[in-house]
Amino acid sequence: MVIIVGCIIVCASVIGGFIWAGGHVGALIQPSEVLVIGGASGGALVIMSSPAVLKGLVKGIIQALKGDPYSKKSYEETFSALYELFRIARRDGLLALEGHIADPHKSAVFAKYPKLAADHHATEFIKGAFGPVIDGSVRPEDVGALMDIEIHSMEEEHHLPIHALQTTSDGLPGFGIVAAVLGIVVTMGHIDGPPAEIGHHVGAALVGTFLGILASYGFFAPLAGKMNLIGHSESSYFKTIACVLQGFFNGMQPKMAIETGRRGLSSELRPSNEEMEALFKAVDSGG
């Protein structure tokens, strides 16, 4: 929603200023210029990207339009779920978690926290951390290295679509110049026409440069920046989970393990001590 508001502000400011200066909006409507710029930049994007990157780009744009999925509520649910899992492990042993970890979507614990349960990547990440420890294939103190590798791989995978979009954004002014040059070529074919006709063709050519620059700096580059911010937010979320899990695997008490993750959060996302105590009490009481 915020992105849409931003796009409206950009369009209103540019077009409003143009009209205020005495321009006519109809002069900016040049479908041929849009075809050249949009088609060329889209083709370049396809050339530089793999199918996986294009698919990731579509998902990233959709997520950017929806907004950052990792809110304070997300962290509170995650902390509560991890605390409950830790309590079960402390009371009944790690093997008691096997049913919850094997299929989180059927777990009574995860079912209490719908936001976490709906996040497939988060539940798989938690499953991937507990699983090797439960079956004894990995020592608890070594799980941190595995989680770090997985997070690094996730960051690299998410960076590729952003890089492709940013590169496309950087190329848009150039494609705008291409459209403008083609417009001048058309103008030269009408050089013997009346001044009004020549002026119309020159204006249409200049619109190409205008559209390329506007699309780059007004829409594509900011969108890439938004996707980058969401990528950082996701990375921070998984790093927080990894920090909490590693603390527990290193022998920390459940509450202290949760506290190591809570303290690493920004003030906007960090639950207060009072809020954490309320969460702990809710879990302890079975709420």
Image (cartoon, helix red, strand yellow):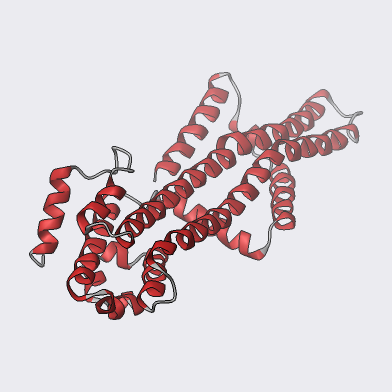
> How far across and how far down the image is residue 31, in percent?
69, 45
Q: Is residue 149 above or below residue 1?
A: below
Whether residue 128 is situated above or below residue 23 in the rendered picture:
below
44 left or right of 62 in image: right
Q: How many numbered tags mark residues here?
A: 0
The residue lying at 26 percent from left, 43 percent from top is 270
Q: Is residue 19 visible?
A: yes
Is residue 73 or residue 236 the one in the foreground? Answer: 236
* Along the viewing direction, whichever of 183 and 280 lies nearer the viewer: 280
The percent coordinates of residue 153 (x first, y second) are 55, 58
Q: Position of residue 99 (x, y in %)?
A: 29, 81
Where residue 32 appears, as percent x and y from the top left, is: 73, 45
146 in relation to 97, above or below: above
Q: Nearer the viewer, residue 129 or 184?
A: 129
Left or right: 125, with 95 as reference point: right
In-image side of 178 versus 104 (left or right): right
Judged left or right of residue 192, residue 161 is: left
Location of residue 171 (image quadrant): top right
Residue drawn 54% across the image and 30% down it: 15
Residue 106 appears in the rendering: no
- Residue 214 in which image quadrant: top right
**Picture residue at 11% right of the left edge, 63% below the top:** 284
Pick the quarter of the image with the C terminus.
bottom left
